[in-house]
Amino acid sequence: EPEVTQTPSHQVTQMGQEVILRCVPISNHLYFYWYRQILGQKVEFLVSFYNNEISEKSEIFDDQFSVERPDGSNFTLKIRSTKLEDSAMYFCASGGNTIYFGEGSWLTVV
Amino acid sequence: KNEVEQSPQNLTAQEGEFITINCSYSVGISALHWLQQHPGGGIVSLFMLSSGKKKHGRLIATINIQEKHSSLHITASHPRDSAVYICAPQKTSYDKVIFGPGTSLSVIP
């Protein structure tokens, strides 16, 4: 069964610090996504990525957020200066014929 | 109006009961996903549908594209089925999925 892996599984960070969440998508997939889920709320779309550029982003994905595929295998989400309201579970997904989700990275901003 | 609606929002069932979760959506789609999320856990893809019906074990998913409606059925429910079930349509292939609000299912022994 193909698998999307995410690291770290849980991170606690101080407000204002930079955070990088990492994802290893499925190797032959071309489309990559980040979603987030604030505790008790539904999953929200952040950004989709194809051919080394952002193909779509939501209003949530402001200048504090960035994504990149630095080495052809990892897909990262960077939050430049974290805020308390960035505390959430962040899910990576990759798409081929169907979409596979990672287990998520819990981010707690204190 | 939300693009994706699910009913019921919460559901408690006795073990062994037949369960139905409904999803309606307002956008044109190429596919619809049913996803499962356990508390504090990751998201697992159960089905991807573009027409008709699919079955996997005790789970059955159906979709009516013309009526913009899909259902997820669980036969002979079991406590381990307790989770949030999410309907997530997809407008075009490789587009983002649009998450519904989820249905929280609790199956009591």
Image (tube, coloured by chain):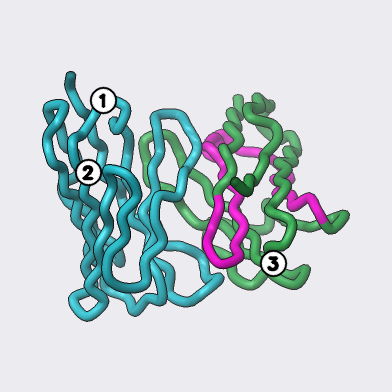
Residue assigned mark 1: B79
Which quadrant does the N terminus of chain B fall into? bottom left
**Residue in the foreground of this view, choosing between B75 and B8:** B75
Residue assigned mark 2: B74
Judge whether B25 appears above or below B66 on screen: above
Q: Magenta includes A91?
A: yes
Residue assigned mark 3: A30
**Residue in the foreground of this view, choosing between A16 and B83:** B83
In this rendering, position of residue B54 left or right of residue A66 = left
Q: How many angstroms separate mark 2 from mark 1 (CA)?
A: 12 Å
Residue at figure coordinates x 52%, y 71% from the top left = B95
Total marks placed = 3
Residue at figure coordinates x 55%, y 70% from the top left = B94
Farthest residue in the top direction?
Answer: B109
The kind of residue tagged 1 is Pro
Q: Which mark is residue B48?
A: none
Q: Kindly check if marks 1 and 3 are in contact, taking CB atoms under 8 A apart as contact.
A: no
Residue span colored magenta: A73-100
Q: Kindly check if marks 2 and 1 are in contact, taking CB atoms under 8 A apart as contact.
A: no
> In terms of secondary structure, where does tag 2 sit?
strand
Residue at figure coordinates x 52%, y 37% from the top left = A88
Which chain's colour is cyan? B
The kind of residue tagged 3 is Leu
Chain of residue at mark 3 = A
Residue at figure coordinates x 46%, y 62% from the top left = B97
